[in-house]
Amino acid sequence: MADATPPNALGRQAAYQLADVTKTRPQFGSLTPRWLTRLLEFKGLSAGIYRVNRVVEGDTPLDVLCSQDPGKREIPQGYVEYQTKPREYELNSIAAIINVDTNVADVYSSPYDQVGEQLALAVESLRERQESQIINNDEYGLLKNAVESQRIKPRDGAPTPDDLDELLTKVWKEPSFFLAHPRAVAAFARECTRRGVPPATTELAGGTFIVWRGVPLIPTDKLFVDGLKNPKGKSGKTNILLVRTGEQKRGVVGLYQTGLPGEQSRGLAVRLRGIDDRGLASYLLSLYCSVAVLADDALAVLEDVEVGEYYEYR
């Protein structure tokens, strides 16, 4: 762009050399709000292992006496059986190493500390991976650990109010939230609009969410559409989860390690590995996490949801 300043006045390019430039911290465009890890209840572990003891349940509960007839004095006898081989969850490690040139950190750390900014961005990356693992991990991820009886298909492809009602029949004991890709949330809203039953909204954890039957729909791009976070086309298939969370509710519980050396936040430790002969400081970031499903009916999945249905309104 040509300098429009008159010849006898100071030009913009020269004046720029004396101006203070207001700078932002490094902006990481792929970061998300990570609502799942905000809303999921977590349990701290001291030894990295979480055993889920379950009762062996029969067709009927334990017999009890319930009668006002004085002739019926015999109290039923029995006991409640426990599983002899309960499932144990071991924490998964997510790690990264960050290197920072100490010369750069010494000279170029105003107004922002270079080491702090590098570590902050690395922590955000680890937290993003944590949320993805909670959903998609082959061993403990929610998608893999929903039992067959808790999996259903949509009636017509797109996620309809009837489909979410069916999910609610699977997790009817104090459901906490639906979890869906933003495209799936939009697809459900379109189906509601088409039927003249626009869903309500609610404020939760600092965000505004669509609500169905009093249960919020929480968006996350970690529930992929055709295996992608950001699908290019309008069509595609994904899954919608319904979750009950909390140990007291026999729900889904996030797990993390407590008492870590160099602990920075929940389950996350940052350690200085040392400074080499070239002046490179190396930092190890370790995040320990897992998730446990305490009861089968704490989790249900609506599978193969089509997100590309659009309609003409007049």
Image: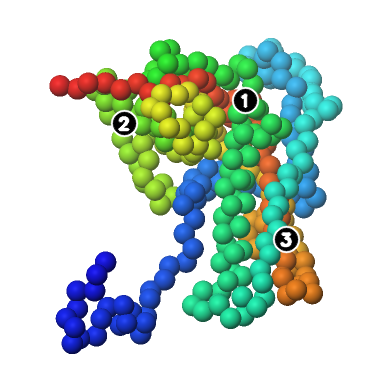
**Spatial distance from mark 1 to mark 3, Cα to Cα?**
34 Å
> Is residue 219 rendered to the left or right of residue 126?
left
Indicate the amino acid at tag 2. Answer: Pro
Residue occupying image coordinates x 40% and y 19%: 158
Q: Nearer the viewer, residue 158 or 178?
A: 158
Q: Please tell me whether residue 255 is drawn above or below residue 106 in the rendered image.
A: above
Q: Earlier in the sequence, mark 1 or mark 3?
A: 1
Kind of residue sitting beneath label 3? Leu
Q: Residue at x 49, y 77 (%)?
A: 111
Dot 1 alpha-carbon crowd within 10 angstroms: few under 14, some 14 to 19, many 20 or more = some
What residue is disc 3 on?
Answer: 284
Q: CA distance from mark 3 to mark 2?
A: 45 Å
Q: Which residue is mark 1?
A: 146
Q: Are marks 1 and 3 in contact (CB under 8 Å)?
A: no
Q: Quadrant of residue 285?
A: bottom right
Asked whether residue 269 is in view, the answer is no
> Mark 3 packing: few (<14 Cα in 10 Å), some, or many (20+)?
some
Nearer mark to the viewer, of 1 and 3 = 3
Local secondary structure at mark 2:
loop
Q: Mark 2 and mark 3 in contact (Cβ < 8 Å)?
A: no
How many numbered discs, if any?
3
At 51% from the left and 74% from the top, the residue drawn is 112
